[in-house]
Image (cartoon, helix red, strand yellow):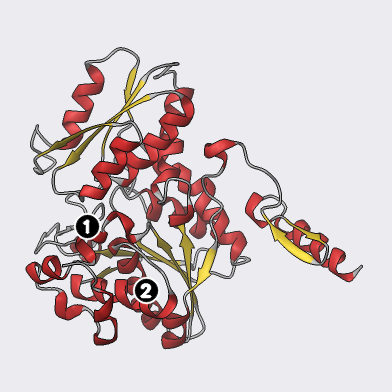
Amino acid sequence: PPLMRAAARLVGTFGHARSFRRSAIRGITVTNAEPVDGLIGAIGNTPLIRLHGVSEATGCEVLAKAEFMNPGGSVKDRAAKFLVEQAERDGLIGPGGTVVEGTAGNTGIGLAHVCRAKGYKCVIYMPDTQSAEKISLLRMLGAEVLPVPAVPFDDPQNYNHQARRHAESLENAVWTNQFDNVANRDGHYQTTGPEIWAQTRGKVDGFTCATGTGGTLAGVGMFLKERRSDVRVFLADPPGSILYSFVKSGGQIMERTGSSITEGIGQGRVTANLQGTEVDDALHVADERTVAMVYTLLQHEGFFLGASSALNVVAAFDMAKAMGPGHTIVTVLCDGASRYQSRLFSRSWLESKGLYEAVPDDCKHLVSLE
């Protein structure tokens, strides 16, 4: 029948990627018809979603990878999987071992899930500036969480250095080193990039996202540029990060100004994951625009997203405007807002940051917490 032939054509086109296999069952097209192997097998192959508002406002197709749909709830599930599996291949950890990481939250949550699935212990060092929701969730997942004062990377008490020393003090333990372990970048080169290429059928003109470790931007950017050299890659950056000035100056300036409410993005150095990445331009996104987009996406499209996701959508809007109508721009929806709701949806917290007035008037009723 015609429907079965159409389904067969789709399988023939996308049969190499699990999420794009389809089969027709009683006249219904079913996506992801095949089972996956446990929690680890469910990581990746996320939907690519058209964002109506920014697409219509720019005349471009603005698409976003729904990384909040990973089993651990964020894009960092991919890094967690690849970091642990690389440590296993390298013989750095054995059964019953301990994974230690320094993380602002989402990589830790991904690692906690992966460790539970693989039978490892998990120890997380994190800056004490992170949201209470993230810390509580990590503990619920069985991780040992050690919040420490937020200090610069060159300080020996930086959370990353404390994590490394802790791992070195244990038997059968590994520090996964998400910032400078390129297994992070490789995970996106091997999965996220190919997924975007398949989902757009190669019709992608630009990719943008913010960076913390640099793994997503670097891995996706490298893959897409290998497939088509004219694909443009823009780095999105919040206040308080040096990467905007670094890219804009051709690597000559590393200037940090201001601070941001966003968590897990922005950087004070160029990580090993980001080194060697061809970045065409950088976009600076103020917190006011990020907060406005958090609420706009919820009010008008139903997306309940965190600040880093909203920042990426603002960046995709700016990239679409810069490139002009008719282009296809892809970004990443890193995680949902439930990990930040006590802040992002609190009037008193927004006012304390001078951001309540950034909430659009037609969205102010969504500021539901005192």
**Left or right of residue 141: residue 114:** right
- Asked which quadrant contains residue 211, the reply is bottom left
Q: Secondary structure at mark 1?
A: loop
**Left or right of residue 156: residue 145:** right
Please tell me which residue lies in front, 298 or 321: 298
Please tell me which residue lies in front, 273 or 227: 273
Q: Residues within 10 Å of mark 1 (few under 14, many from 20)?
A: few
- Asked which quadrant contains residue 172, the reply is top left
- Select label 2 or label 1 by which is in front: 2
Task: Name the residue that disc number 1 marks.
Answer: 251
Task: Name the residue that disc number 2 marks.
Answer: 298
What residue occupies the far right of the structure in this picture? 1
Q: What residue is drawn where x is 43% and y is 44%?
A: 77
Amino acid beneath label 1: Gly
Residue 202: image location, x then y, percent: 60, 65
Q: Is residue 47 above or below residue 212?
A: below
Residue 326: image location, x then y, percent: 51, 84
Q: What residue is drawn where x is 65% and y is 49%?
A: 18
Q: Is residue 60 above or below residue 254?
A: below
- Asked which quadrant contains residue 28, the reply is bottom right
Instruction: Check the picture and name the quadrant holding the N terminus.
Output: bottom right
Residue 180 seen anywhere in this rendered image of the structure: no
Q: What residue is drawn where x is 44% and y is 50%?
A: 219
**Left or right of residue 347: residue 55:** right
Residue 296: mark in rendering: none
Q: What residue is drawn where x is 48% and y is 55%?
A: 69
Amino acid beneath label 2: Leu
Q: How many marks?
A: 2
**Left or right of residue 353: residue 28:** right
Q: Is residue 164 above or below residue 32?
A: above
